[in-house]
Each structure stands twice: as C-alpha cells, then as structure tokens.
Image (cartoon, coloured by chain):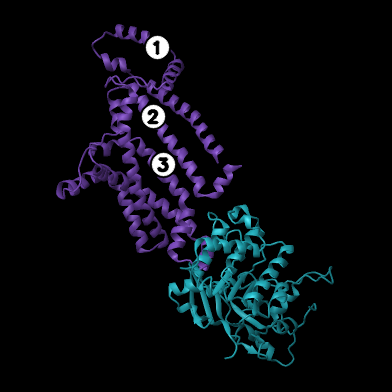
Amino acid sequence: MAEELVLDIKDLVVRYDTDAGSVKAVNGINLKLRRKRSIGLVGETGAGKTTTALAILNLVPEPAGVIKNGSILVDGKNILAMSESELQKTRGKGVSMIFQDPMTALNPVFTVGEQIAESIRIHEGVSEKEAMRRAVEMLEIVGIAANRVNDYPHQLSGGMKQRVVIAIALACRAKLLIADEPTTALDVTIQAQVLELIRSYREKYDTAMLLITHDLGIVAESCDEVAVMYAGNIVEYGTLEDVFNQTKHPYTEGLFNSLPNIIERRSKLTPIPGMVPDPTELPEGCVFAERCAYATDECGKTVQADQWLSDTHMVRCSRYCEPDFNIIRRIKT
Amino acid sequence: MHRYVFKRILLLIPIMLAVSFVVYFIVDLAPGDDIDAIYGNELTAEQKDELREELGYNDPLVIRYARYMGKLLTGDMGTSSFYHEPVMKLYFSKFPATLNLAFWGIIVALLIAIPLGIIAAVHQNTLIDSASMILGLLGMSMPNFWFGLMLIILFSLTLGWLPSFGNESWTSVILPAVTVGVGQAALLIRTTRSSMLEVIRQDYLRTVRAKGVNERTVIYHHALRNALIPIITAAGTQLGIALGGSVVVESVFAWPGVGKLTIDAFNTRDTTLVVGCLILTTAFSSILMMLIDIIYAFVDPRIKARYMN
C-alpha cells in the first residue's frame, strides 16, 4: 500500500464487565488514519468515543474494561500485542493524548514544568535540565508565560490547565495525536485559539490526529474525515464532504438537525427523540432503530452491515439500499 | 511560610495551658497526696494537716496551679516524693531512651506498612491483598508482650544475635523497636491501602501512564505522593502515643523509658511526678503534631498555598 497508515483499527470490541452486566462500549469498529490526516470521531456522550481512544493507548481501565477482540496497529505495530516496555515507548512518543477534563488530568503535587518535562526526559533521553528547558519552550508554544513553569496546577485557570495538558501531549512530537474533546472545558473565545494551536503544530510536525468531539462545527474546521459513532458502532464514515453534504445515516441527520439554527433564530431545536439504548442490552438489529424516523420492522431485527457508497463513504443502514430512500435535511450547512 | 510556622508555635501556648490545667485538676481530684505518700504513718493526721497548711496545699486549686506554672517557667517542676529528685531530671534521664525507641519503632512500622499497603491497593481484591491484610490483622492482634517474648526467645536465647534487655549498645533497640513497630504497622497498612486506593483511580495517573511512564514510577512517585497525607497523620499519631512510652514493651525489655516512670509514679502516689510526666509527655506530643502540620505543607503544595495567604 502506498498510503502510510498511522492508525489502523480493525474490528475493535471493548466491554466493561460490571456487576450490572457487561457494558458493550465498543462493538466492532474499523478506523484507518493516514499520515498528516485527521479524523473527527463524533457522537453523543456514552457512544464509546473515549473508550476507543483509551484502547489505542491500551489504557482501558482495568479490571472492568476488557478489549475482547480486534487489533490496533499504530505505525504497523499492534498495540494490543505489545509488551509493557514496548507500550511505554509508544505512549507519549508514538501516540499521545490530550485528555478531556483539565481539572483532573494533572497531578496536583507536581509543578506543571515537572509534568511536561517528564515525558521529554523519558522519550528523548535528555538530562533533567535540558528536559526542563524544553518544557519551558512547550509552555511558551501553548501560550503560557515561562515564569509559570514552577506553578502547581491549582495556581492555573481551567484554560491554562488545558494548555498544559496539550503541552504534555505535544511535547514529544508524537506521530499520532488523540484529542479527546480538547476544547469542551474552555470558553468559546479560547476554543478557536486552542484549535489553531493544535493545527499549526500538526502542520509543523506532520502529526495525524483523531479528534473526539460532539461539536460538528469543530469537526468541519479541523478534520479531513468524519466517523459518526452511536452506541459503540460507527454508523457513518466518510470525508467531510461525504458526511456533511451527502449525509446518508438517519442518526447523522439527527445530529445536524439538532444544531441550533443561526439563520432562523426563532426556530426550535429538533432533538433526536428517545434515549440512547442501554449498553448492557443493545438491540439485536440496528442500534439506532428505536429512535429512527425511517426505521421499518425489519431494521430492529437484522444486523446492519457496512455499506460502501464510494471509496470513502460508508454507512451502516440497510434502508439506504432502497431506491426511493432519501434523508431530509432541515438546514443547509 | 515563616509566618505559618510562627503561628503554629504560638498556638502551642494555649494548648499547653489547657492540657496542663486539665492534668493538674484531675490529679488533684484523686484521693491522697504526696504528704500521705512521704510520711504515711510517721506523722499524725493533725501534723500532716499542719504541714499542708504550711506548704499551701489547702489554697484554692487555681492559686496552686498558678504557683506550679510559675515555677515551671523557671524550669522547676517540683521534686519527686518517691525518688527525692527533681522531676525534670528524672524525666529527662528516661526520655532519650523513649525517643530512641519511638523513632525506630515508627521507622520499622513504616518500612512494613507502606510497601504492604501499596501492594494491597495495587492488587485490590486479590490473594496478595488478602495476605497483607491478614498480616496486618496479625500484627494488631498479637499482644505486645507475647510478641516481644517470642522475639527474645528466637533472637536472644536461641540464636544469640541480639541482646534481650537494657539499652547498652545500638543493637539493644532492635528487638523493642520491632515489637513496637509491628503493632503500629497494622493500622498503617490499612491507612496506606485505603489512601492509595483513593488515589489510584484518579484521572491524573492516566495522564502519567499516557506519557509512557513505567508503572513503578506511576505508583511510587505520582500516586504515593498524593496518598501521603493520611499516612503521615496516622504515623504521627502513633509516634505521639509512643512518645508517652510503652509500659508493656519497657517492662519486657527492661527498657529505661518514661512509660514505666509514669506508671510507677501513679503506683507510689507521687503526684508531683505524675503531673510532671503527663505535662511533659503532652508537650512533646504537641510539638510533634506541630511538626507534622508543617510537613503537610511540604508534601502538598495546595496546603502550603492555603497557609501562605
């Protein structure tokens, strides 16, 4: 293959075995990411986005979380088959991750400088002093003054903490960056700055990115491809153009319809009716059938297969095959 | 930071005043005094009353307390009626041995408890966890005197490696310290385990792991530092208790500490010595607690920040 795959997830299945039953968090997803490219992983809370991300680092919280099946190739090497020491070399250097909640993501008893320098020291084999110098550099790159290097997390604002989390993730120029809702905790005004920061950094170091978000606007701004996730399944996948303008899955449509309409301010929001299915008891057939406006009796019974519309566009919906089937978009993007 | 330390030292004054008054008051409630203890049947009841009147024993409690404290400030805590020696001198002839034993005892306890507690937390609900909990329980349930005797039988009598009594050489402290430490370790294992369990699930450890840090560093560097405050509190409390001396351990090993001195003072109705021992012991415990408060600030920058303001 000519294309360089940075990430290749095949048939990944992750469960959380709890007393209340087995939570089916991720149910056989496939995802490919090429060098320099970026995928937006979109979906509601509980769709399995973060679990997927943690699986890429092999950090699904044990003992409840179990990766039941599949393989995750990072740069051609299977993360799930690595020894502990190989994993330690890959984490932070091959794959790094920006975590979702900056309030809890930093160790409260070490300075931010120490926390950034730690990964540099581990992966670059430099002296403590040199690592610290580069940590200061990283702080400045993410827009924090160098004199804050000896501050503890509690001395920083939420936005600054998130920048520190980003600095940690970017410190070793990983080939693959996983960004788990990097801007959710931030003010709208800072969101754009942070996204711009990540973008320019990726450009400089040819970093591929898996961006997890529920904000379609952010996806449109910073991704090449989109994977829409629902109840542990990828229900639609394609380029921005495919998914945004040729929407094929009723759930994706629902996501677009539930966006606030800026042009017609007085129009009401159209939420998707119903609730996300209980992940311990997923329906037999299509996971979205219960809430789907287009569902037939058949949908709830048959397991949905991936349908490829083109080389780039995939949808997991059997109704798509019917000749007179059409999705109605309320607003134009 | 200096202001914080200074404030904590100032706070010792009201604490010491309150504690000394309570001690003085309670001992005063007990029947009999050192005039009874000294003269017993040598003097008649009238003669003793006269003597009491003369020495100011019949003055109101508050006045006697004030007089006592005034003398205390000049370093005079009275004379023991049993030993006929100054209380200060008696206490400080025994205190170094107690301090020595308490120090090595808590070191032994921490050396046992921290690794076991961490292992138990990391392997929660496994065989390793249960094994360390049972070990802890064993340490708690074995009576001190019995365990001490077993140590003497094994290491002094059978193997002949260590002295069984007294405080002559540096090896003398080993057996009593192990006896004290094993007892203290039991509680500390549990504290370490529960404190580590709380920290081990925190998000920031995930961030650390995602950096590629090895598991050892994750646990001993990042997690332990966060779990340390409750462990220090528990260890400090135990050390404070140990500073009062342990009658049992001191008796088993013929250790010349303040525990036995205090109990003997009670038995001989040596009220001056009782009051002196209790006040000095609480004074050292209070100073220890103050030191622990200061240590907190160095372990956790958030506590330090709170005190800075």
Tell me the residue that label 3 is attached to: B237
Tell me the residue that label 1 is attached to: B58
Q: Amino acid at mark 2?
A: Leu
In cyan, which chain?
A
Q: Which of the pair A194/B56 is nearer the observer? A: A194
Image position of A92 (left or right of B125) = right
Tell me the residue that label 2 is attached to: B280
Q: Are marks 3 and 1 in contact (CB under 8 Å)?
A: no
Which quadrant of the structure image shows residue B88? Answer: top left
Point out the tag, 2 or 3, that comes first from the N-terminus.
Answer: 3
Q: Position of residue B108 (x, y in %)?
A: 33, 48
Image position of A88 (left or right of A264) = left
Which quadrant of the structure image shows residue A147? Answer: bottom right
Which image quarter is the C terminus of chain B in?
Answer: top right
- Of marks 1 and 2, the one in the foreground: 2
How far apart, in angstroms, are the residues tagged by discs 3 and 1? Answer: 38 Å
The residue under the point 62% across, 62% down is: A139
In purple, which chain?
B
- Of marks 3 and 1, the one in the foreground: 3
Residue B145 can be seen, yes or no = yes
